[in-house]
Image (cartoon, coloured by chain):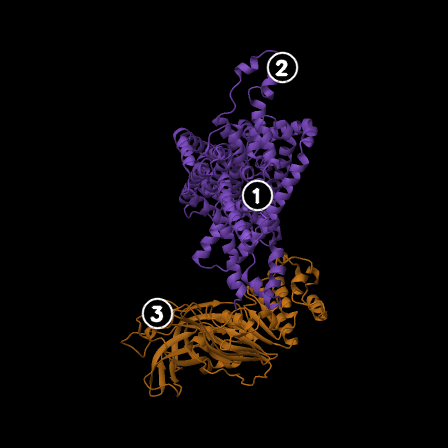
Chain colours: A orange, B purple
Amino acid sequence: MPPLKMSDSPNTKGLTVRHISHSYGGEAKRPVLDAISFHVADGAIACLLGPSGCGKSTLLRMIAGLAMPQQGQVMIDGRKVTDAGQKHFIAPEDRHVGMMFQDYALFPHLNVYDNIAFGIDERMDKTWMHQAIRRLGLHAHVGAFPHTLSGGQQQRVALLRALARSPRVLLLDEPFSGLDADNRIRVREETIELLRERSMAVLMVTHDPEEAMFMADSILVMKQGQIIQSGSPTETWLGPANAFVTELFGPVNRFCAKVCEGVVDTPLGRFAAPPSINEGTEVDLLVRPDGIGIAESTQEDFAGVHGTVVAARLLGRVSHIKVDIGNDQLLHVRIAGVILPKIGTKVAVLVERCSAFIFPCQDKQACVSDRAETYQEGAASSKAMPFSLRKERNSPL
Amino acid sequence: MKTFWQHYGLRGIILFCAVLVGMPLVMMIGSVVATSPQDDEVWAHILAHALGDYMVTTLALAAGVGSLSAVMGVACAWLVSMYRFWGSSFFKVALLLPMAMPAYIVAFVYTDMLDHGGRVATWLNDSTGADAGAEVWFDVRTLPMAILVMALTLYPYVFALVRASLVEQSFCVWQAGRTLGCGAWRNFWLVGLPLLRPALVVAVVIVIMETLNDFGVVSAFSLPTLTSGIYHAWLNMNSLSVAVRLALLLLVLVLLILLVERWARGNRRYHAPSGSHRQMVAEHLKGARAVVSFCFCASLVVFGFVLPFVVLLWLAAHNQHQAFAEGFVGYGLNSLALSGSAAMGAVALGFMLAWAARPPSGWLFRSLMRLASIGYAIPGAVLAIALLLWLSAVDKAQNAGLSWLGWQGAHFLWVGSWAALVYGYVVRFLALPYGAVDSALSRVTPSMEHAARTLGASAWNVMRRIHLPMMRPSLMTAGLLVFVDSMKELPLTLLLRPFDSDTLSTWVWHYARDEAFAVSAPGALLIVCVGLLPVVWLSSMISGSTAKKSGWLTNKQTALRDTNAYAPA
């Protein structure tokens, strides 16, 4: 899929990555990065979102100049800093990049102040740094050593250290993964505030979709070394490019079926197949649990799908309800508010069309295998009943 | 991205160190081939009359010292770690003190006191007014006494390593043993000893290495070991070739022990499972048990340190004028300068070596690295013989080269120079700073290095601003250890020192051999006092090893690795 914000002008401000490819191993080459291209404009925040091991961190290190790709170019503010073809390489210290590491990499022998000021020249203006130290509540700890700080404080020190040099490009490698849930939300807000006031391109690596949605102007979804979708958070959420992207944002109800006369007939009802999908193709119907509504009903007054509540749990702001829709199939539903129907209640199931996605079934194996046993094995339908699924995926919602 | 320097310079350093250490050994093995009929005669004589004695005594000494110090070390480590009794916290430090005592100095003190006509015998005779003392007096210069004296000064290695390993284990392990029906005694045999085995094996091998290395004690007790055979062949019989053969025999013995160690340790390493790590809660001992424990620990400290130290103090106080007249200050300065240069040289080289080895390179360079840090396993006498051969070859080549260039007059020699001695110390003790630097480097994570690079520091600046400051404590410690060890070192110094010059250790040895130990007592005292420095530091490190596991203070833990550096890789 072509990147959305690709720019060809060499004078563009911000970070430009072009056709970066890299593979490990000798003969049996395993591509780590496969023709990655994108652009992050000055002042924009982009998020590389993907599961661990998809090459996100490797890409970050190549942009920072800590590793050399086998192919491709990196440009910062229109200046070529890496060009594998021409063996052109500018050392990391001369690139004006700031990088924040997952383990923070604070220097244990330097106190907080010296850590933050590590990259700053004597002649540089330190006003912003002093203000930021105060604003983030670190002024009481400037003399302390990193190991005496809490996780949140360490994160702030690492962030300030990377920002203090006013880098043109800021790279954040899983910046919040070391924090507990409470801290994470607070530190995230602080961070985004801080990033907004400095003009630079920010590229953040994360595996947490919520974090990506919160922080980013654009999300680049990576899978096995490739960018498979890029766009704004809203675009990505509302129009995921495939089943992988859909599932990246959280567990879904998955049903397998075949396109028949432009229609996909599933136990959840009939859905119009997208025009791009050919007749007879096996497809996956993915429905987000929060895109399903239920209403108490009797058999007679509703023509749609009916089911029986088998479990209902309150998870705080949302309620999680499991509905048996017959044929041994369970449907996971999430509804905001305290909605806890009694077990055994007959309900009518309503699917919000914009939360249901149809993609050609990529994993044929999963589609024809007899039974879904685990979350990973995917949806299953019996060969004998290709259209009617016996059981939706056994997802641990 | 790799510069020319990274590619070749770093490997050059490894190669240089390996040549520095390896060439003497290669020369030694090569020189066995070339012998004269005279040498063969001497060798035949030794083969017929002495070699059996050498082997038996050496093996008996090694086995005796190894097992006795193991018993002493494990017993006292177990007692002070698991129990509380009167003085137990004092003993945690005090039991390390004998480490500061070079075995040969303790041997000189005891022979000086207990020999026929020694101080105690004389005093007994004087006080009883008859020859009664002399008649019942026993012979002190025997193998068992030598074993006892060496075990008394070497058991702290066992104590330190076993205790560190005990402190690292979670207390819950012992508690679990108790709840599963093991009494204190069964717990020791079934849980304690197996868990301590890796540490114990390392410690005992260190002790045996030190025993094989020793020359001072065996010369004080006039025991025929391989080491004394080497000296005898070279200094009295003037046959370097025979000395080389004996040295090779000793080397083979060392290699065998290293093999046994590897086999005994296997891949065993017991890690306390992470998570809850409960500090040891010592049990209170009362009554007879407390008395026995106290007496046991106290006797080790008294006979291993206090008594010899007091005697040294007393002797030094009474003989200081004579000592100064005999050139004590000059020898002291010699020792200081030599040990200082050795410490600096070893730390610099060890640092470069560990730095060069950082990106793990191929098997060739890994084995060269091994070779470069093998010096500690080679007995001082063997190393000295090897260096003599190597340096005289270098001398010959150098002078041939100089005369070819037309420089007829300038013949400067490596053999018998102070530089050669420093070279010997550096080769022998290189493993200490190398091990320390290596473990210190591992605390600089790759991301720290990367962070510094993205913050504008060049590769050179990263080393200057990150690596060096983070490693400074480890480097200082390693330097101190090399300094102290060089100061104590006797066998290597005796063979390599410049003609007619002495260091403190050889000076002490000369006087002790001439039964005038008292004159050189101030020198011995000075060696002991310098040796106390790292012991004090070591004791603070062992008890702190669990308290401060995280953060910058972990460099205290390096100390443990430093003691492990005593163990051959």
B345 up-or-down from A372: above or below: above
Which amino acid does the dot numbered 3 rest on? Ala
Compared with B340, B357 (above or below) is: below
Q: Position of residue B435 (x, y in %)?
A: 53, 50
Residue B157 image point, x, y percent: 53, 39
The quadrant the N terminus of chain A occupies is bottom left
Determine contact: label 2, label 3, CB under 8 Å: no
> Residue A81 at x, y = what percent?
56, 76
Residue corresponding to mark 2: B126
Q: Is residue B322 above or below residue A396?
A: above
Where residue B323 appears, x then y in whole percent? 67, 30
Q: Residues within 10 Å of mark 1 (few under 14, many from 20)?
A: many
Give the distance between the C-alpha atoms of the residues marked 1 and 2, in whole angstroms: 46 Å
Camera-side residue: A183 or B244?
Answer: B244
Residue B171 appears in view: no
Mark-to-mark CA distance, 1 and 3:
75 Å
Q: Quadrant of the C terminus of chain A?
A: bottom left
Tell which subunit mark 3 falls on: A
Q: Nearer the viewer, mark 1 or mark 2?
A: 1
Instruction: Rate crowding at label 2 as few (under 14), some (14 to 19) or many (20 or more) other CA atoms within 10 Å.
Output: few
Left or right side of A238 for A169: right
Between the residue at mark 2 and the residue at mark 3, the CA separation in whole angstroms equals: 99 Å
* Label 3 sits on residue: A372
Mark 2 element type: helix
Q: Amino acid at mark 2?
A: Asp
Nearer to us: label 1 or label 3: 1
Residue holding disc 1: B421
Determine whether, in the image, residue B299 is placed left or right of residue A382.
right
Q: Badge 3, how many Cα within 10 Å: few under 14, some, many 20+?
A: many
In the displayed orientation, state which residue is furthest to the top.
Answer: B130
> Of helix, strand and loop, which one carries label 1?
helix
